[in-house]
Amino acid sequence: MTRFSLKRPTILVLVISSLLAIGWFTLLSNSDQQVNRTEHTVLAINWYQTSAEFRALSYQAYHIGRMMLDQELKKRSPKKRAIVVDVDETVLDNSPHAARLVFENRGYPHLWDEWVNAAKAEALPGAVEFLQYAVSKGVDVFYVSNRRVDQVEVTAKNLVARGFPQAVPSHMLFKEGESTKEPRRQTILKTHNIILLFGDNLNDFAEVFEGKNVQERGAAVDALKEEFGKRFIVLPNPIYGEWEGALYDYNYRLTDSEKDQRRKQALRSFE
Ligand SMILES: [Mg+2]
């Protein structure tokens, strides 16, 4: 029988390895360095930028819009008709900005102003043709966006360059104070009959969707299900949105690691 004994150098090696292991474990469990800030957005951006399905969905949204517009034109309207569109990820594609955030491993609003000022965003498939058609039928277009009001001019430059109609300040209701778009929709309603709204975010359609948690958002959509594909036309945005904010209870100050945890906790699996 051999007796197991530890010699001093062996003990030293064991102590050092234990300390290293504890240090590594602490790093893994407490530090944000384990969670890459932008890695989770890569596949969504890939989908947005490369999938033909994305293009098809955008055409689909604007084709549904045209069918609904044609139906509306057969009815009488007491006021001039209007179509309300959001800007970002509804008529303009800002995915190059999201891609740049991946390369720099930074979060929004890093370089957002630089991107907006470059006025280089492409139009979403089908958007220009649809809005030009609407204007040709005597319908007004309003761009209701949460870009800042001081970004109206440069955004107009971008929209005009892509061929969008009525991209002039009087048709661009950008964010001046609060994020809610309801007061801006009410302003339009004073003079117009809003027949269609386009957006990538539920808040682009009605106040009832604002500030709700994940379950409440789902329930609010169910309650208004008749509106979708009729008066409310939704564009896909898997990169960001209130849907993500809802996962974090709109607390964007959570650490990267806490956000990662929330995302994983929200996954529905099976036993
Ligand atoms: Mg948007």
Image (cartoon, rainbow, N blue to C red):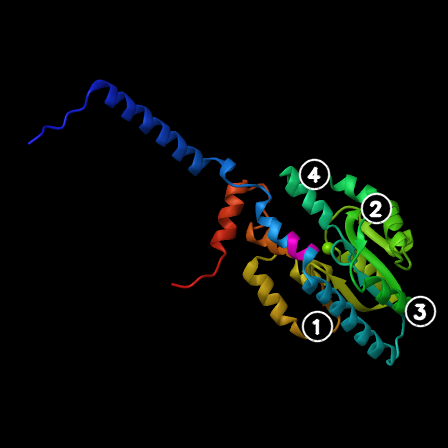
Disc 3: which residue: 136
User: Which is in the foreground here, disc 4 or disc 1?
Assistant: 4
Q: Is mark 3 within 8 Å of ligand 1?
A: no
Q: Amino acid at mark 4?
A: His
Residue 42 position in % (x across, y down)? 61, 49
- Left/right of residue 248 with respect to residue 271 in the rendered view: right
Disc 3 crowd rating (10 Å Cα; few below 14, some 14-19, many 20+) is few
Q: Amino acid at mark 1?
A: Glu
Q: Amino acid at mark 2?
A: Ala
Mark 3: secondary structure: helix
Q: Residue at the spot x=87%, y=66% of the render?
A: 192
Q: How many marks?
A: 4
Q: Is tag 2's residue or tag 3's residue first in the polypeptide sequence?
A: 2
- Residue toward you, 195 or 42: 42
Disc 4: which residue: 110
Q: Which residues are magenta?
A: 45-49
Disc 4 crowd rating (10 Å Cα; few below 14, some 14-19, many 20+) is some
Q: Residue at the spot x=93%, y=69% of the render?
A: 136
66 vs 254: above or below? below
- Residue that protrudes farthest toward the top in the picture: 8
Label number found at residue 227: 1
Q: Is mark 1 within 8 Å of ligand 1?
A: no
User: Which is in the foreground here, disc 3 or disc 1?
Assistant: 3
Disc 2: which residue: 119
Q: Is tag 4's residue or tag 1's residue first in the polypeptide sequence?
A: 4
Mark 2: secondary structure: loop
- Residue toward you, 188 or 116: 116
- Residue toward you, 103 or 83: 103
Disc 2 crowd rating (10 Å Cα; few below 14, some 14-19, many 20+) is some
Residue 32 part of the magenta segment: no
Q: Quadrant of ligand 1?
A: bottom right
